[in-house]
Amino acid sequence: MKIAVLVKQVPGPESPLPLVSSQDWLDESQVAYIMNESDNYGLEEALQIRENNNDGEVVVVSLGPDRTQKVIREALSKGADRAIHIQTNENYPTDPLEAASLFADALKGEDFDIIFSGLQSDDLGYGQTGVILGELLGMSTATLAMATEILDNKIKVKRELEAGYFQWVTMSLPASISVQSGCNTPRYPSLKGIMGAKKKEINVVIPSVGDQNQSIKKIYAPNTNKETVMIEGSVDQVVEKLVTVFRNEIKIA
Amino acid sequence: MDILVVLEDNNGTIHRMGIESIAAAQHMVDSLGGLSAGAMVMGKNADALATEASGYNIDEVLSVNHELLNDYSSDGYAEAVKQVINKENPTYVLFGHSYQVRDYVPKISAKLMRPFLADSIAIDFDGKDVSLTKQMFNAKLFSDISPSGDAPFLISFQSASFLSDNASTGTANKREVVINLDSSMIKTESEAPFKESSGGVDLTAAELIVSVGRGIGKEENISMAQDLAAALGAEISSSRPVVDSGWLSPSHQVGSSGQAVSPKMYLALGISGAIQHVVGMKASKNIVAINKDPEAPIFEIADYGVVGDLLEIVPKLTEAIQSK
């Protein structure tokens, strides 16, 4: 079983998000990057399948500038066998269709049985790259995976639906599966894993980036038209004011 | 047809977000003028959905009947919508950003090599140039996004970006559209949907809700929120991390993977306000948030906010309500 895992480096939840003067992207020099949360689960799912089958290869694939190698090394230290870095300059595509096309170009000769991706990235949040990539490579696709089971030349996926429902879907391999956060318990790298990662191969691919089909014109702080009344004071004062709001403003009987 | 709205089946009626997309299409017609708008239905309930859709103020309702569309599959639905797009040549194809739409619409984007402007919260026009607003970086920032190249442009709207109550009624013509599918196109086989938890809690009709998030800290503190809910006569709910930690059962979850609620008061305790949660509760009449992080996005949608330690505030609030 040959498995690719797409991982993305994104700003961490505590990172500052200052904008460049043109206001169409972040000033990346001040951003603290981490591995995208749901990608951790995709990686873990791949490692567990390899371990359960005592066979196979897990290849981590990431698109982005030089800094991306930090999350690639992290994935290698957790147990991925090798990596493909689709290395762009600082103006990497934000359009998911263009990004998926670059992944397709880099992966089409590899004949992966499964491609795992996270549900969506915590930066742009389009949630499309894994599905588009699967479609471009003629693979089966599934999203919101909560569990997987490998059958003979097929994969069975437990998908999350709306309103607390789930559904099992079986599909032929090869398949591109995007996983939901919480579908397994991602491991931490071991010291041995961290040492071993340094010797693992990162194949750097320079893509030919085409035109974007959609692009970001402007980024700004949310302009909410809602006036939030902030209730301040000591704990006792806050409690007293809240009770008054409940009674007189919201009119809770 | 300039605008095609693709409606989703929710057990024989139009999915709420579909009606919101009709409201979005009507808003676009009003903004630009001179555009024609239609809707499309498919699947085993297509006839019932077409009848329901024909009661809205749009030009046409297209029905696609095919036995391979009776049950949802991402391959079948993507191919069907693609073929209708190729026949009707719409400039804009609108969807509600539901779980089903996330599953199959990216495939249409790949088939047509045209962009999918997903999870938008607003649409604006500058002359004929369209721009969509989208939340990014976990809703901490907004961005304006424009498509380039030729139509069609696939667009989905986040829940409650347009209100279903604003969709104006009318009489639309119904028309059948024939498409070609064969079973070799469908690579998946689906089993029946199921629910995992028993003893579900229906929060959709609740008048008052006390909801807990990660900020509650640990399982032992849940009872503190339950005491407050009892004092207020409110239901208890939570965001996803609380359910993932096993502190409350999944039936208490509010958000895109849980229930959508609209109570008179939604009291959010230690909930940061991630989009996945907010889509399930932003229709609440009054939102009161207590959170120790003044930057938490929940304060952007709250009517009343308290920056403070809920572990100190909640027990005293319970006491004050009990004693009044």
Image: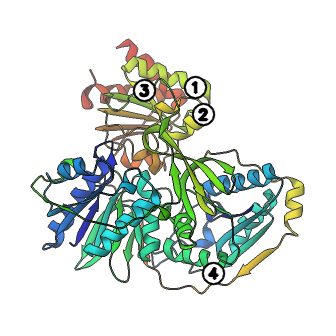
The kind of residue on which mark 4 rests is Thr
Residues B201 and B191: in front is B191
The kind of residue on which mark 3 rests is Val
Evaluate if marks 4 and 2 touch, with contact meaning CB atoms under 8 Å apart: no
Q: Disc 3 vs disc 2: which is toward the camera?
A: 3
Can marks 4 and 1 be said to lie on one chain? no
Which residue bears the numbered disc 3?
A: B201
Which residue bears the numbered disc 1?
A: B221
Quarter of the image that includes the C terminus of chain A: top left
Residues B185 and B92: in front is B185
Is tag 1's residue or tag 3's residue first in the polypeptide sequence? Answer: 3
Q: Tell me the element at label 1.
A: helix
Determine the CA span between mark 2 and mark 1: 7 Å
Give me the residue at 13% from left, 51% from top.
B55
Give me the residue at 33% from left, 28% from top.
B206
The kind of residue on which mark 2 rests is Gly
Determine the CA span between mark 4 and mark 1: 47 Å
Residue B163 in view: no
Which residue bears the numbered disc 2?
A: B217
Can marks 2 and 1 be said to lie on one chain? yes
Can marks 4 and 2 be said to lie on one chain? no
Which residue bears the numbered disc 4?
A: A88
Determine the CA span between mark 3 and mark 2: 23 Å
In the drawing, does residue B87 fall left or right of residue A119?
Answer: left
Measured along the vertical axis of the image, is residue B253 above or below residue B104?
Answer: above
Residue A195 horizontal/vertical position (percent): 89, 62
Q: Tell me the element at label 3.
A: loop
Measured along the vertical axis of the image, is residue A153 above or below residue B90?
Answer: above
Residue B124 horizontal/vertical position (percent): 27, 69
| Scheme by which the image is coloured | rainbow
Can marks 1 and 3 be said to lie on one chain? yes
**Which quadrant of the figure has residue A231?**
top left
